[in-house]
Image (tube, rainbow, N blue to C red):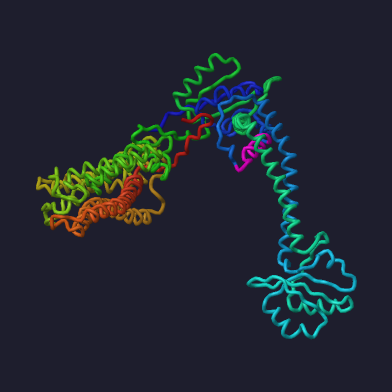
Amino acid sequence: MIEKMKFLSITGPKADIDRVIDQYLSRYEIHLENALSELKTVTSLRPYLEINPYKAELQLSAELLAEDKGELSGQTSCREISLEDSVKVIREVNEKLTGLRTEKAELEKQAEVIRTSMDNLIPFADLNYKVSDILHFQYVKFRFGRMTHEYYKKFMDYVYDTIDTVVHKCQEDANYVWLVYFAPDTLCDKIDAIFASLHFERFFLPDEYEGTPVEATHALEAKLSAIYDKVRSLDNRITAIMDQYREQLVAANRKLTTFSTNFDVRKLAACTKQDDNTFYILCGWMSETDAAAFRKELEHDTDTFCLVEDDHNNIVSKPPTKLKNPKLFRPFETFIQMYGLPAYDELDPTIILGLTYSFLFGFMFGDVGQGLCLMIGGYLLYRAKKMNLAAIISCCGFFSTIFGFLFGSVFGFENILEPLWLHPKSAMMKLPFIGNLNTVFVVAIALGMGIVLMTMVLNVINSIRNHDPEKAWFDTNGVAGIVFYGSLALVIVLFMTGSPLPAAAVMTVMFLLPLLVIFCKEPLTALVEKKAKIMPEEKGMFFVQGFFELFEVLLSYFSNTLSFVRVGAFAVSHAAMMEVVLMLAGAEAGSPNWLVVVLGNLFVCGMEGLIVGIQVLRLEYYELFSRFYKGTGRPFKAYGKTE
């Protein structure tokens, strides 16, 4: 069901808007509209232009709550705090933390420099000579670096003995050899060029190391350890501040979030000036119940006024859709939202979908044992996780259990219970001109024809609500379609049961007249709407197009009816699959393998349950909804409290 809506215009002094939002709108569900768009006929309206003063502090509070790896972000607080105190505590905490964070960032930068120096120095640990002395050679140049194994081997085999240089090999890994080479100052450029041609990568070590590379590395490790101690000390101080202000920060963030959200209402408000006073105007939709309670509460508020517009022709926006269904059918709203919410003046198909979906699922998946598993499992999952799909599975399991008793099937065993109706796989009936046919196929087609007729009736109701005479009276799914398809269904039933058929004249009226009305629906609609032009100019094209459209209508009636054969087919296939499972388990021998029975039931329940669920949803969308439902509604988005 769709809740009835009322369009409200709320106005008062501009300076009073925060009080009204906090005192009223935060407690009532209202779908706000843009006042400038809605009140186009009102003169001297202008937008409510103000910058959100809470945005900076709110962002700062969010950043503070993300400190310490987000440990505060999940905290809750029952503490109440004023807006002024919220701003004060956030600024105070941020001021205390800014200096600590700056100092920590500087220490981390120093640590990164030391780690880089250690990484450059460690490969030369085998050089048992003071680095500082090497860096101060006067007549001999040095180069620290690395080259690949391939070029190092070539250098040692073909070049080393031919040039004036000394190479000290240090550490190596799978790809590189780290080394230091020395060369006379006068030949340095030539030797550098030779090493460069061999892809020598030079490292520059700063003039700050003391002792050998090993000793320098130990000194750097000591410095790095001291820096880490200082960083840990700063982290402890930051954590202590966070612990001290934890509840205040959470309460301040909550307060600022509320006020920031309230302030954003101004984006949808408009202002108007009268004499020296400026007033705000807010527009929106409320349910009839909330609107009545809201107006009653405003009777004692002399600064706030509320007007209700009952004529929807004077309102620019269309009413939003707020569904209100019984709790049992509420989970099925998920399928409605997947297709599209009903428009405000449409029928809400939630209850119809819930009943038909569960019924068809049960028909196609009739088994007492598996149905009970789906029903209980879905219910427990819904209670634990509040998943709508779990509740839908539970409802489907209930109908599966009922049809399981009707089919006499318990976990695939058909010899435990006597069927209250029939066994789907073996039940047959004799039909004229057709012969023997599975009973569930016949019932499925009859059930489908009944559902199609029901959707046609719903289409007529929707079309009358929308003042669409063509769809209501002359369309394929209108009154003309109901008469034709209903007559066809009645004649088929009478013929199959051996009952006498209506006279030929009656059948001619029942069949030909509705088809003629459908063929001429455009001229008839123009005639009902009293248009000056009834027939189109190109009459030849009209008759050709009408003929092929009528042929398509007849074909769609036939194909849509046959679509419901799948309902019976899945009922038969479910019984056949369980028969295969029991055959594999050796049930015919009298002592089945219970592990195979259990695993087979789990497989069939999971795989076929999923397939049946998808197939039933396809029937709902394509065979039911396509006939009467558009799903063009827009959701009701409530500002403030939502239950």
Instruction: Name the residue at 30% across, 55% down.
Output: 551
**Left or right side of 238 for 35:** left
Check the image and report above or below for 449 versus 86: below
Q: Which residues are magenta?
A: 56-69
- Residue beneath the point at 71% across and 67% down: 123
Q: Nearer the viewer, residue 259 or 520?
A: 259
In percent of width and height, residue 22 lies at 58, 24
The secondary structure making up most of the magenta span is: helix
Can I make out residue 456 in this image? no
Residue 10 visible, this angle: yes
> Which image quarter holds the N terminus?
top left
Residue 57 is a magenta residue: yes
Front in this rendered view, residue 485 or 17: 17
Q: Could you say which quadrant of the image residue 57 lies in?
A: top right
Which residue is depicted at the point 73% across and 53% down? 222
Tally of marks? 0
The magenta stretch spans residue 62: yes
Q: Position of residue 62 (x, y in %)?
A: 63, 38
**Location of residue 361 with respect to 153 vertically, above or below:** above
Instruction: Pick the residue in front: 477 or 422.
Output: 422
In the rendered image, the vertical position of residue 536 relative to residue 250, given as above or below: below
Residue 261, quarter of picture: top right
Instruction: From the viewer's perspective, tell me whether residue 491 is left or right of residue 631.
Output: left
**Residue 176 placement (x, y as % from top left):** 68, 72
x and y percentages locating residue 260 in the rendered image: 62, 32
From the viewer's perspective, is residue 336 above or below residue 603? above
